[in-house]
Amino acid sequence: MGQKGVAACEKKTSRLNAHLVFLDESGIQMSPNVRRTWAPCGQTPILTQRTLSYKKVSVIAVLCVSPERDKVQLFFRLHTVNIDTAMLIDFLKHLSKELGRIVLIWDRLLIHRSREMQSFLAHAEHLHIKYLPPYAPELNPVEYVWSYLKNNPLANFAVFDVDELADFTRRNGQSIQNKQSLLRSFIRHSPLFLHLK
């Protein structure tokens, strides 16, 4: 999706008075993303974690650009199991109630193209779908949300319980929701030619 692809999406969202929505899924592991940190001299920081734990928090998130291009919003939902098509459809139904008409841009993940999803999309007149090119995650601004979340508030955060991880992730996600300048930076950092007011 180059400059022409984004321009076409912008025209379509303007014509429909729709939100331009970027969607992506990710997993937050119980083992922390280890980053360099400060500590008192001679006191090496120690991260204690539960080994051999494959539990994680799965997250569906969208960055929504308003029809006027003057506001960016983040919506997300957490799950302690792998995300399936039914969960994604339920998320899209709630998102549509919140936003109305949507031009949805996402990758070619298998659950996005499943028979169940295609059946749902065929009857969802308020949803207009565009796919990102294969192997181009840098084009999806939600990827920058994951990068920020995992490398800043969640870095060096070791937990023993998946519910504690979900609670911490939720609180930090809600904190990001309230930072308009940060949300706008995710859109601007993407190589998409999307102009915000």
Image: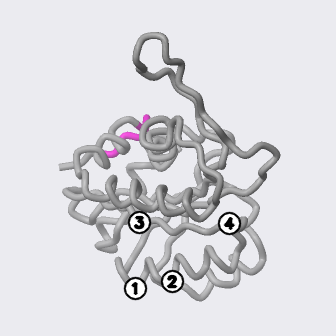
Q: CA distance from mark 2 to mark 4?
A: 14 Å
Amino acid type at circle 2 is: Lys
- Point 53% across, 77% down: residue: 91
The label nearer to you, 4 versus 3, is 3
Amino acid type at circle 1 is: Lys
Marked residue nearer the N-terminal end (4 or 3): 3
> Mark 1, residues whose alpha carbon is within 10 Å: few (<14), some, or many (≥20)?
few
**Tag 2's secondary structure?**
helix
Relative to 42, say whether 181 is above or below: below
Relative to 60, say whether 136 is above or below: above
**Tag 3's secondary structure?**
strand
- Point 76% across, 61% down: residue: 110
Residue at the front extreme? 42
Q: CA distance from mark 1 to mark 3?
A: 13 Å
Residue 143, image x, y percentages? 52, 44
Residue 77, image x, y percentages? 51, 69
Amino acid type at circle 4 is: His
Q: Which residue is labeled 4 in the image?
A: 112
Q: Are marks 1 and 2 in contact (CB under 8 Å)?
A: yes
Indicate which disc residue 75 carries. Answer: 3
Q: Which residue is labeled 2 in the image?
A: 93
The label nearer to you, 1 versus 3, is 3
Q: CA distance from mark 1 to mark 4?
A: 20 Å
Q: Which residue is labeled 1 in the image?
A: 97
- Point 66% across, 67% down: residue: 80
Q: Is 82 within the magenta?
A: no
